[in-house]
Amino acid sequence: MKKLVSIAALVLLAACQDWPEPVIRSVSPSEMRASEATVLDLDAELPLPTVVDYSKGTLEVDTRVSVSIGTLEVPTLAVSPEGVISTRVPSILTPGRYDVKVTLGDGRTAVRPGGLTVVEGEWPEGYSIDPIGPQRRLEPFTVTVRATGANAAAFRGNVRLETGAGGTIGPRVSEPFVDGVLTQQVVVDSVQSNVAIRVTDLAGHTGTSNTFTLQ
């Protein structure tokens, strides 16, 4: 994303080819449970690359910022004027320590080694999927998944979604559950006319829908 900013509205901005490297000051929280999707705030120095157009009296600021946890790229939810980056980490990382990396639009990076620690989680015993009626290939429809057993009502993690051989589903990773329930739009394609959806969490707990017709 690029943004045009009036020169008159800025006190201190200058075009420069040798921009300093970004810096991650802190990651908050620095620890998350493996079973719970977690919003992180990265406090960072972000010297964004800027190009001056003197004829138009504008500055073009490249505001693109991406975040990775280990090898997992996570979404950038927001970037504050003070340089705080908000992101959400899904519950698909095994326990351990992970480097946190920020990449700016021009490729400059900052890394905070071991910036996030993932600890053991508390998982439900399984999942049930509400009945699914006939659907059309590549047309979105809604599925409802419910965590079951111990810890079900408190579950706020993510699951992976899949279909059988010869089929595809999107997204592959769900949104976070809300108090043990997931309501998610999906798109399915398959060479088969009868398919089912299977969900699996990081700990190996699963659930499978009824077999439904895909037209």
Image: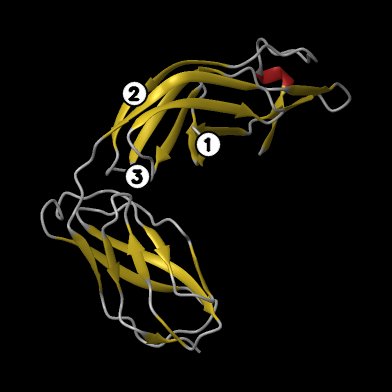
Callout 1, which amino acid? Thr
Badge 3 element: loop
Q: Is residue 28 above or below residue 181?
A: above
Residue that badge 3 annotates: 91
| Residue positioned 63% across, 17% down in the render | 47
* Mark 2 → mark 1, Cα distance in angstroms: 17 Å
Callout 3, which amino acid? Ser
| Residue positioned 48% across, 26% down in the render | 100
Q: Position of residue 152 (x, y in %)?
A: 15, 55
Residue that badge 2 annotates: 30
Q: Position of residue 164 (x, y in %)?
A: 45, 75
- In contact (CB < 8 Å): disc 3 and disc 2: no
Q: Is residue 139 above or below residue 109?
A: below
Which sits in the foreground, 191 or 39?
191
| Residue positioned 37% across, 64% down in the render | 184
| Dot 3 or dot 2, earlier in sequence | 2
Callout 2, which amino acid? Ser
- In contact (CB < 8 Å): disc 2 and disc 1: no
Q: Quadrant of residue 40?
A: top left
User: Which quarter of the rendering shows the N terminus?
Assistant: top right
Q: Is residue 37 left or right of residue 55?
A: left
Q: Position of residue 158 (x, y in %)?
A: 34, 52
| Dot 2 or dot 1, earlier in sequence | 2
Which sits in the foreground, 195 or 137?
195
The mark lying in front, picked from 3 and 1, is 1
The mark lying in front, picked from 2 and 1, is 1
Residue that badge 1 annotates: 71
Check the image and tell me how it is coloured: secondary structure
* Mark 3 → mark 1, Cα distance in angstroms: 14 Å
| Dot 3 or dot 1, earlier in sequence | 1
